Image (spheres, rainbow, N blue to C red):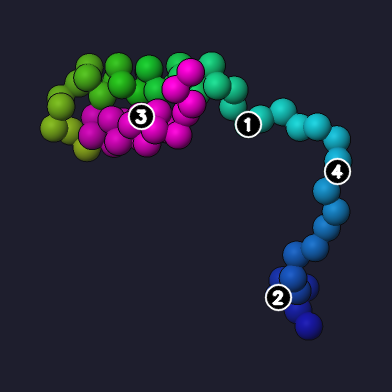
Amino acid sequence: MDDLAAPVTGSYSDAPRLPLITLGEAREAVRLLMHFSELGDADSDEALDAFALATDIAGRLPSD
């Protein structure tokens, strides 16, 4: 059997891990994305993409 076709197996550590991004960092990213979506041409693809990403991320964050 080809090594690339073999299933991926492994063991995972039980040690605590840090999150990829903290809640504060995620909120700051949303704030900056909203800022950049409002800064330029509202009809540009970049502005629309920034707004869509900001709203998607914001919808996943806790509301506390």
For marks 1 and 4, the one nearer the N-term is 4
Q: Residues within 10 Å of mark 4 (few under 14, many from 20)?
A: few
Disc 2 is placed on an element classified as helix
The quarter of the picture where residue 63 lies is: top left
Measured as percent of width and height from the top left, residue 32 is found at: 37, 18
What residue does disc 4 label?
A: 13
Image position of 28 (left or right of 53): right
Secondary structure found at label 3: helix
Marks 1/2: CA–CA distance = 29 Å
The vertical placement of 13 against 38, above or below, is below
Does residue 12 appear left or right of residue 57 in this picture?
right
Q: Which of the labelled discs sits on residue 54, or is there none?
A: 3
Q: Are marks 1 and 4 in contact (CB under 8 Å)?
A: no
- In this figure, what is the number of numbered marks? 4
Secondary element type, mark 4: loop
Question: Going 53% across and 16% down the picture, which residue do you hit?
Answer: 24
Residue 1: where, in percent of width, then height? 78, 83
- Judge the density around disc 2: few (<14), some (14-19), many (≥20) Cα neighbours within 10 Å: few
Q: CA distance from mark 4 to mark 3?
A: 33 Å
Mark 1, secondary structure of its residue: loop
